Image (cartoon, rainbow, N blue to C red):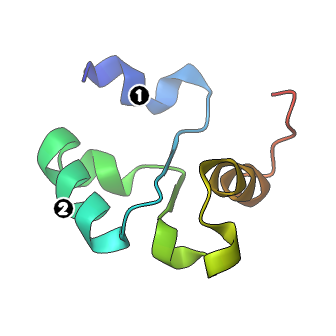
Amino acid sequence: MRPRLLSSNLGKKLAVCSAATKSSVILCLENLIGIERFQSLDCFLAGDDLSDSFQDNFSIVLSIAWKLDISSVE
């Protein structure tokens, strides 16, 4: 992954959402991008953060958009 994609200087919010378990995604991301970059994400949401009725990818993306206070057009 290119470091500039994770740069906070771009004026964009950066989130990771996954239907996988939180522990597996944290382990993966910390190894891929490093602990410091992982901790600098604006929002992180995993499948076990949601109830069973919200396990589809679209619901996860909508949940993260709500947490970041962004509209669907952004």
The amino acid pointed to by label 1 is: Ser
Q: How far apart are marks 2 and 1 (CA)?
A: 21 Å
Estimate the x, y position of residue 17 in percent, counting from the top left: 51, 52
| Mark 1 secondary-structure assignment | loop
At label 1, counting other C-alpha atoms closer than 10 Å, the crowd grade (few under 14, some 14-19, many 20 or more) is: some
Residue that numbered label 2 is attached to? 27
The amino acid pointed to by label 2 is: Leu
Q: In which quarter of the image is residue 63?
A: bottom right
Mark closest to the chain's N terminus, 2 or 1: 1
Q: Which residue is drawn at 63% across and 56% down?
A: 60
Estimate the x, y position of residue 18 in percent, counting from the top left: 46, 54
Estimate the x, y position of residue 32 in percent, counting from the top left: 17, 41
Q: Which residue lies furthest to the bottom in this view?
A: 51
Query: Given this view, does label 2 or label 1 mark the residue nearer the observer?
Result: 2
Residue that numbered label 1 is attached to? 7
Placement of 10 over or under 70, stated as above or below: above
| Mark 2 secondary-structure assignment | helix
Estimate the x, y position of residue 27 in percent, counting from the top left: 18, 61
Foreground residue among 67 and 39: 67
Q: Which residue is drawn at 27% across and 23% down?
A: 3
